[in-house]
Image (cartoon, helix red, strand yellow):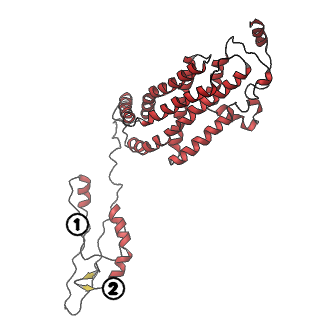
């Protein structure tokens, strides 16, 4: 519509209308405009009545526009643009509703109740989205069968089998770590809900972390147990199944915690995937499988101790080779990895002398 006063067209008023229309539209959607526009409509509609105290507070301080005087003669229209009276509102005058009063506790519920309620809610979310659990379970089950058929038997006592055991264990640890990357978008999607609820003091951040961990612990146990049983039975490993499962279980908890940490720091899940994959690959490179600690430059040795793959890998090797088990073969059969440049110890010579 073309701006007019009493049916008469005014080009100056029209130009000001179109110039400030976007500003009025923006402030009309957000809040009351804080500056006077260069145009004024003939009549400003009043506010919609509301029942809340805050709405009544603003309703009593509405914008008043004096009536437009009629022209004295119909032949000589008078365009008298009245200046609206704006009452500047201070939106900081009202205290936030979530601020605790003097002497009142900051949180409405105790910590244990928050953990119980959040655990129940997280468990319901997991039950409603079973693909989050089944995807990793299927990956570990299928890869366990594939690895067992590829490496076949790893129960022999020769040095060649040692090389194959090293390859199997390092791939198993990396499989556990890389299969946890699907948890990157999970916390990113819940992060906005978490920020909104914690900003209103609905619960503590520690309650959220502990409840999530308690819910996911049984699922991690099932996933680690599935992979440990399949590989141990099909490959005839000499390691103890219980210790093998505990190491995989701890690895799943570690990598899930690391993924949640990265998800809390990055802005999007694409960036989260990039950071998690890059750092996991760096951990894999410096874990000691490709290069021993003594072969890593000194300015990179701190990554060797920071690597999250180093500790479960060494734990699996200790579980496999610790004890009085004897191996035979040429030392040249060993790959120059973590077992390269071996020195024959007195214990090794003593065990070889007692072997049949």
Residue at 75%, 15% (x, y): give it: 328
- Where is residue 199? Give x, y as percent: 40, 43
- Where is residue 216? Give x, y as percent: 45, 30
Q: Circle 1: is it few (<14), some (14-19), or many (20+) Cα within 10 Å?
A: few
On screen, residue 87 versus residue 292, left or right, reads left
Looking at the image, residue 341 lies above or below residue 353 = below
Q: Quadrant of residue 312?
A: top right
Residue at 20%, 53% (x, y): give it: 51
- Where is residue 221? Give x, y as percent: 48, 25
- Where is residue 53? Give x, y as percent: 24, 52
Looking at the image, residue 95 lies above or below residue 116 = below
Q: Secondary structure at mark 1?
A: loop
Q: Quadrant of the N terminus?
A: bottom left
Which one is in front in this view, the residue at disc 2 or the one at disc 1? Answer: 2
Q: Circle 2: is it few (<14), some (14-19), or many (20+) Cα within 10 Å?
A: few
Q: Secondary structure at mark 2?
A: helix
Is residue 18 visible from the viewing direction of this image? yes
Nearest to the observer: residue 49 or residue 287: 287
Residue at 65%, 35% (x, y): give it: 284
Give the numbered dot on residue 321. Answer: none
On screen, residue 309 versus residue 196, left or right, reads right
Give the numbered dot on residue 46. Answer: 1
Nearest to the observer: residue 154 or residue 189: 154
Give the numbered dot on residue 11. Answer: 2
Is residue 311 visible from the viewing direction of this image? no
């Amino acid at each position: 519509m073309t701006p007019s006063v009493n049916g008469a067209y005014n080009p100056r008023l029209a130009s000001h209308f179109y110039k400030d229309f976007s500003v009025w539209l923006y402030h009309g959607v957000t809040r009351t405009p804080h500056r006077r526009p260069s145009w004024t409509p003939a009549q400003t509609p009043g506010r919609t009545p509301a029942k809340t105290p805050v709405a009544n507070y603003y309703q009593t301080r509405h914008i008043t526009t004096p009536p437009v005087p009629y022209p004295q003669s119909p032949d000589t229209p008078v365009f008298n643009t009245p200046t609206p009276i704006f009452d500047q509102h201070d939106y900081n005058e009202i205290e936030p509703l979530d601020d605790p009063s003097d002497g009142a506790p900051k949180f409405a519920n105790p910590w244990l109740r928050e953990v119980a309620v959040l655990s129940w809610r997280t468990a319901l979310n997991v039950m409603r989205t079973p693909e989050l659990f089944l995807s990793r379970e299927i990956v570990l089950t299928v890869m366990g069968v594939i690895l067992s058929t590829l490496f076949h038997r790893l129960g022999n006592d020769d040095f060649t089998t040692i090389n194959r055991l090293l390859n199997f264990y390092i791939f198993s640890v990396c499989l556990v770590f890389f299969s946890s990357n699907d948890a990157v978008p999970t916390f990113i999607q819940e992060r906005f809900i978490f920020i909104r609820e914690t900003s209103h003091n609905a619960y503590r951040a520690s309650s959220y972390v502990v409840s999530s961990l308690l819910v996911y612990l049984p699922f991690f146990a099932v996933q680690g147990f599935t992979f440990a049983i399949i590989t141990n039975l099909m490959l005839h490993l000499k390691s103890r199944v219980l210790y093998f499962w505990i190491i995989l279980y701890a690895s799943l908890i570690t990598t899930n915690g690391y993924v949640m940490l990265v998800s809390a720091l990055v802005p999007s899940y694409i960036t989260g995937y990039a950071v998690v994959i890059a750092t996991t690959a760096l951990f894999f490179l410096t874990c000691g499988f490709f290069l021993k600690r003594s072969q890593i430059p000194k300015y990179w040795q701190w990554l060797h101790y920071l690597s999250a793959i180093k500790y479960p890998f060494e734990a699996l090797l200790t579980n496999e080779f610790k004890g009085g088990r004897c191996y035979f073969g040429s030392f040249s059969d060993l790959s120059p990895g973590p077992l390269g440049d071996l020195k024959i110890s007195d214990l090794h010579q003593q065990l070889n002398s007692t072997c049949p």
